[in-house]
Image (cartoon, grey):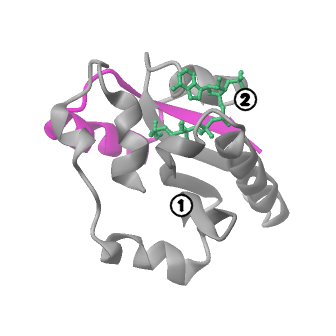
Amino acid sequence: MERSAAQAFQGRDVPAFLLVHASPPEAWRPQLKAGTLWVVESEGQVVAFLAATATGDRLHIDEVDVDLGAQGRGVGRRLIGHVVRWARDAGLAQLSLTTFRSVPWNGPFYASLGFVEDARLPELQAILAAEADKGLSDRCAMVLAL
Ligand SMILES: CC(C)(COP(=O)(O)OP(=O)(O)OC[C@H]1O[C@@H](n2cnc3c(N)ncnc32)[C@H](O)[C@@H]1OP(=O)(O)O)[C@@H](O)C(=O)NCCC(=O)NCCS
């Protein structure tokens, strides 16, 4: 799923390793155990997933991916909308993520969902620093007040 989704970055100014990277399944086990990993199924196939981690009253989206063949059909928007409602119902105050500022279906897409660029939280600064160490530039932190 991660590798398929990342093919959308072909021809974009992103590091080449992103196109072939896939996290080991264990990487998402904590979110699965915590009940903060969602998948979208279509005709018996998983076509999207979102993994998030709750820290205090904030839910951080660690990863969201839609299979390349299912992109651009509203799956991502519906999935994030579902997680926004879930987080509100859980009494959380904020949703956060880090993303590419200039990729049109990243920063501008999340802005259209109400996220605003905000890197004041030290935890988000630490994530951006770790991403920069891996060669990911043009990244920003975004926060949605619930
Ligand atoms: C980002 C992502 C999760 C969005 O999910 P999606 O199901 O493709 O998006 P939706 O169909 O819900 O559309 C969301 C908006 O993004 C736009 N969009 C989606 N894919 C696009 C593309 N390849 N190029 C331009 N715009 C695109 C849509 O036009 C839509 O805008 P609109 O609602 O104003 O029409 C998904 O495209 C994806 O997995 N992309 C590759 C990996 C990635 O970018 N992960 C997120 C990193 S933070």
- Asked which quadrant contains residue 5, the reply is top left
Q: Residue 114: within the magenta? A: no
Q: Is residue 52 above or below residue 129?
A: below
Residue 24: percent from left, percent from top: 27, 70
Relative to residue 9, is residue 43 drawn left or right?
right
The relative height of residue 32 versus residue 62 in the rendered view (above or below) is below
Q: Is residue 122 magenta?
A: yes
Mark number displayed over residue 32: none
Q: Residue at x 52, y 18 (%)?
A: 104
What secondary structure is marked by label 1?
A: strand
Give residue 44's position: percent from left, percent from top: 65, 71
Q: Nearer the viewer, residue 68 or 51?
A: 68
20 vs 112: above or below: below
In this rendered view, identify the residue nearer to me: 120 or 5: 5
What residue appears at the point 44 percent right and 33 percent down from the top-left corner? Answer: 99
Give, as a single range, the part of the protein colored magenta: 120-146
Q: CA distance from mark 2 to mark 1?
A: 18 Å
Q: Residues within 10 Å of mark 1 (few under 14, many from 20)?
A: many
Whether residue 38 appears in this view of the structure is no
Instruction: Give SS at disc 2.
Output: loop
Please name the amino acid that badge 2 sits on: Gly
Left or right position of 123 against 72: left
N-terminal label among 2 and 1:
1
Which quadrant is home to the C terminus? top right
- Please identify the residue farthest to the front as the structure is shown: 43
Q: Amino acid at mark 1?
A: Ala
Q: Is residue 144 visible?
A: yes
From the image, tell me which residue sits under label 2: 114
Where does label 1 land, which residue?
Answer: 52
- The residue shown at (38%, 53%) is 2
Dividing the picture into quarters, in which one does residue 39 lie? bottom right
In the rendered image, the vertical position of residue 9 relative to residue 39, given as above or below: above
